[in-house]
Amino acid sequence: MPPQTSSPAAMPLLEGELKKLRTKANLSQAVSETDKLLELLIKAREEVASSTDAHSASLIMAKLQNPLDSRFESITDALRPVDRGQKAYGKVLDRSFPSRALPTEHDAMAEHSPLINRAIAMHLLREGQFNVARIFLQETQEKINSNSGGGNQDQDRDMTPADELVSESTPRTTDGSDELEEEEAEEGEEQEASYELDEEAIMAPLRSRNLQLKFEIMYEILRSLRSHDLIPAINWAADHSYELDARGSNLEFELNRLQFIYLFQQGGPDPEFAAQMTDEERRIEGRNSALQWARERFSNRGLQGRHAKDIQQLVTAVVFASNLPSSPYRHIFDASGIESAFSEAGTSFTRDFCSLLGLSAESPLYVAATAGAVALPQLLKYMTHVKEKGTEWTTEAELAFETPLPRSMIYHPIFVCPVSKEQTTDQNPPAMLPCGHVVAQESLQCLLKGTKAKCPYCPVEGHKHDAKIIEIL
């Protein structure tokens, strides 16, 4: 029986049940009863601590039993409708979206375990899970070592009684088949050794302490950014200004700009000291601190050359410090956006830091898992349809349907030839005709009559040498 699909009315039904759950799942009474229970226990503990003999302590504990039972019963009664609401919602959820068994006939990544291990280890390092990454790398290394040494011993140890029976009952021939088997075994061992060597080569860079130290630096700076301390990030950007400029990054200026605004708003580099000032004193101190920072940091020729206009606006805005809300620069010092500004600074720093390491801004494993989760419902629907029809998709390295990924996960343009209706590839790139229309190179060859081709969308005719191959980067 094929897996069930959700009905169109599933979401409205779930929304109705969710409203009921929110009404029933009122934990205020349970929280109140729990607080009273804690008060009873704390009071009893103080009385026991202050008692002078064991008899009085026993009496206190005996008197505590009935109030405790009463409170526990009240908490249970308060949680009972919450439990019923959760169960009812769970039943509706299961009926609306029944679970489906994932297709497991073919695992495309079964032969690429080293690449999967590398992706997992890199993801753990990128997420700052250094201890977990260290243990994971140790276990993968132990597996490599166990596979490379004592293979026959492992095989003998893992052999089942049935295997031993087949091995003993297999007749030995003298027509050279034994030698052939030995050659095949040697060839298999060589391939296995090559595979293990490749896995070792793939995992070796991740075991380097140098890579972990770099990510430790990144997370230390990110922790500082979360506490509104921009100095470590600014110093890092200054140390790598040449590489950042070569990549067209504005990180150094954006960090200095945010520090300028933060000093101006907070009344100086020490928020605790600024909190003790009056509003006028805080405004004057913030203006002086921001101007001092501008003199020290914005004097950099590189920043002045690329961001002269922005620096002028920042410095000029200080003149309107006493009447900033009605000035043309109020958007620069909008206090409501300071948290989002620090969050964006952390994102930009992470992107540029990983870029200098030759890595993408996001974890490839996270992107792959997210993309798979997005495409999975349509894949399940397709697999169900294939099983019902008894058909099979035979084209390799290509899906039978368009994967509905969000725009943020589309990393290169895709061109489908309007003539052949096929996606272009490196072997069949898109070609632009003199009229500006684009077709696949193979379609252009089909359109040729001699050395000329007529565009399938307009009456313009051009020479094949005038067509330009478009490189998709």
Image (spheres, rainbow, N blue to C red):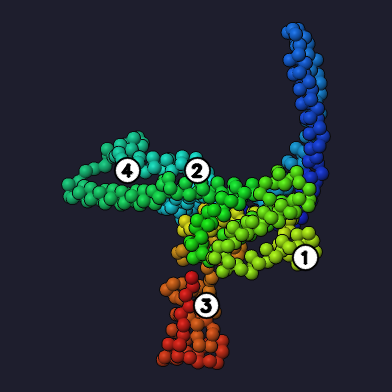
Q: Residue 270, how many percent across, how many down?
A: 67, 46
Please rate how many residues cluster around mark 2, counting C-alpha atoms within 10 Å: few if below 14, some from 14 to 19, many from 20.
some
Label 2: which residue?
Answer: 130
Tell which of 45 and 235 is nearer to you. 235
**What label sits on residue 214 in the rendered view?**
none
Q: What residue is shown at x 53% (from left), y 57% (from top)?
A: 238
**Which numbered disc flags the more N-terminal residue, 4 or 2?**
2
| Callouts 1 and 2 close, C-beta under 8 Å | no
Q: Amino acid at mark 3?
A: Cys
Q: Is residue 364 above or below residue 52?
A: below
Question: How far separated are the C-alphas under marks 1 and 2?
Answer: 49 Å
Q: Amino acid at mark 2?
A: Phe
Q: Amino acid at mark 1?
A: Ser
Q: Name the secondary structure under disc 1.
A: loop
Label 3: which residue?
Answer: 417
Label 1: which residue?
Answer: 327
Q: Is residue 228 above or below residue 61?
A: below
**Which numbered disc flags the more N-terminal residue, 3 or 4?**
4
Please rate how many residues cluster around mark 3, counting C-alpha atoms within 10 Å: few if below 14, some from 14 to 19, many from 20.
some
| Callouts 4 and 1 close, C-beta under 8 Å | no
**Left or right: 461 as drawn, with respect to 280:** left
Tell which of 109 and 466 is nearer to you. 466
Toward which corner of the image does residue 289 lie, by quadrant? Answer: bottom right
Q: Amino acid at mark 4?
A: Ser
Mark 3 vs mark 4: in front: 4
Q: Name the secondary structure under disc 2.
A: helix
Q: Is residue 114 visible?
A: yes
Label 4: which residue?
Answer: 148
Q: Residue 397, how many percent across, how many down?
A: 46, 63
**Which numbered disc flags the more N-terminal residue, 1 or 2?**
2
Q: Is residue 52 above or below residue 301?
A: above
